[in-house]
Image (cartoon, rainbow, N blue to C red):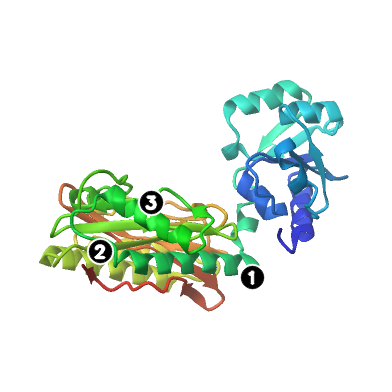
């Protein structure tokens, strides 16, 4: 549980006045974990001017009663909207703020039908700014997750061999993370070899590693509730001249982006720094995704670092920087690292080498 849970609950309650609302509904589980430390798979938090309520089902009764964050635990079966309707907590409410990006249309219709007297006010990114600024304990957990990924990557370099399938490499990566203490993987591990590496989010399959392949390894784990996310591109045998050139361009693009990082920096400026290097080298159309994203309770958090982003980087957030170049039918190269934003700029968290690796 966060040591500053009561302060966080008060910060959330302050949003009621900001949006002139009578209640606030939090449905995104990572945000609920940020607020009170709950680690289960089903919960809801309702904040009113008078009180805060934590709802879950009977599977998490013990955990709910251990949360010392000023929220009143309520353990009940059935739909949350029906439970709240029966309690009368929203009988006098006229405007309720909710997180639209984390509520399905069907669920929203259920809430509207249950509380026809309420004006439901959708507010996107409701808690994103608060969650993005990581506490000291959260930063320690992210560093711990990254340390596991660093060690797992080091171990995997002694395991990967010609003839292994992408899926076998992915399994070995995930096993190494678990043996090193990871709670779980943060996302499905990406292993993309040869022409598959030209697909930014290829899924590992039956293709076997061949001499001359470049191989994208994109992995991360969860430790202490926080995620890591790192990508390295390695080479099976000696890379071609073109592969070496593209690798150098991607690494330079990443370094230029990292130099732009600092508190209150426009995310578009960070993206532009990476994209400009790749465009000037003649590979602009081959950079097919945003430069990075926030990292923490989710592997993809606010802020987004892209060409059309309207976000700025807050102090003490952690973001990824992951430029890539993808040549259809040939190969792709991506390098990704997490960077903490501090008052002096940005500091790299991984210790894994970014030098070109040939196996």
Which image quadrant is residue 142 in?
bottom right
Name the residue that disc number 3 marks: 189
Name the residue that disc number 1 marks: 136
Q: Are marks 1 and 3 in contact (CB under 8 Å)?
A: no
Q: Position of residue 119 (x, y in %)?
A: 73, 30
The residue at the far front in this view is 179
How packed mark 3 is, by other alpha carbons closer than 10 Å (few <14, some 14-19, many 20 or more), is many
* Among numbered discs 2 and 3, the one appearing first in the sequence: 3
Q: In the figure, 120 relative to 347: above or below?
A: above
Q: Secondary structure at mark 3?
A: loop
How packed mark 2 is, by other alpha carbons closer than 10 Å (few <14, some 14-19, many 20 or more), is many
Q: Quadrant of the C terminus?
A: bottom left
The numbered mark at residue 57 is none
Distance CA(mark 1)–CA(mark 3)? 28 Å
Distance CA(mark 1)–CA(mark 2)? 33 Å
Nearest to viewer (mark 1 / mark 2): 2
Residue 353 seen in this snapshot: yes
Which residue sits at x=21%, y=46%? Answer: 207
Q: Quadrant of the N terminus?
A: bottom right
Name the residue that disc number 2 marks: 234
Q: In the figure, 327 relative to 280: above or below?
A: above
Nearest to viewer (mark 1 / mark 3): 3
Which residue sits at x=31%, y=67%? Answer: 253
Residue 267 seen in this snapshot: no
Q: Is residue 87 left or right of residue 289?
A: right
Q: Is residue 141 left or right of residue 46?
A: left
* Among numbered discs 1 and 2, the one appearing first in the sequence: 1
How packed mark 1 is, by other alpha carbons closer than 10 Å (few <14, some 14-19, many 20 or more), is few
Q: Position of residue 2 (x, y in %)?
A: 71, 60
């Amino acid at each position: 549980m966060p040591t500053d849970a009561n302060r966080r609950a008060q910060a959330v309650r302050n949003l009621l006045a900001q949006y002139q609302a009578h209640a606030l509904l939090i449905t995104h589980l990572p945000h609920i974990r940020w607020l009170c430390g709950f680690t289960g798979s089903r919960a809801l938090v309702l904040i009113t001017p008078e009180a805060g309520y934590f709802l879950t089902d009977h599977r998490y009764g013990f955990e709910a009663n251990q949360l010392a964050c000023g929220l009143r635990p309520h353990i009940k079966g059935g739909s949350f909207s029906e439970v709240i309707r029966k309690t009368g907590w929203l009988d006098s409410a006229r405007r309720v703020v909710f997180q639209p990006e984390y509520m399905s249309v069907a669920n929203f219709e259920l809430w509207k039908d249950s509380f026809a007297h309420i004006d439901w006010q959708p507010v996107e990114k409701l808690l994103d700014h608060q969650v993005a600024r990581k506490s000291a304990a959260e930063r320690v957990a992210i560093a711990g997750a990254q340390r596991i990924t660093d060690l797992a990557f080091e171990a995997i370099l002694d395991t990967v061999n010609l003839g292994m399938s992408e899926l076998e490499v992915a399994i070995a990566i995930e096993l190494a993370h678990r043996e090193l203490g990871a709670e779980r993987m943060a996302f499905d591990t990406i292993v993309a070899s040869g022409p598959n590496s030209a697909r930014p989010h290829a899924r590992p399959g039956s293709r076997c590693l061949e001499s001359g392949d470049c191989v994208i390894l994109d992995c991360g784990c969860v430790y202490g509730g926080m995620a890591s996310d790192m990508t390295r591109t390695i080479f099976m045998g000696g890379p071609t001249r073109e592969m070496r050139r593209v690798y150098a361009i991607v690494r330079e693009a990443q370094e230029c982006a990292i130099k732009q990082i600092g508190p209150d920096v426009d995310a578009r400026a960070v993206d532009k720094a990476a994209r400009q290097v790749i465009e000037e080298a003649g590979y602009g159309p081959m950079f097919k995704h945003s430069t990075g994203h926030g990292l923490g309770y989710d592997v993809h958090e606010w802020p987004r670092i892209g060409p059309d982003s309207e976000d700025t980087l807050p102090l003490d957030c952690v973001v990824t920087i992951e430029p890539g170049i993808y040549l259809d039918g040939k190969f792709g190269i991506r390098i990704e690292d997490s960077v903490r934003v501090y008052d002096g700029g940005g500091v790299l968290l991984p210790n894994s080498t970014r030098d070109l690796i040939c196996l």
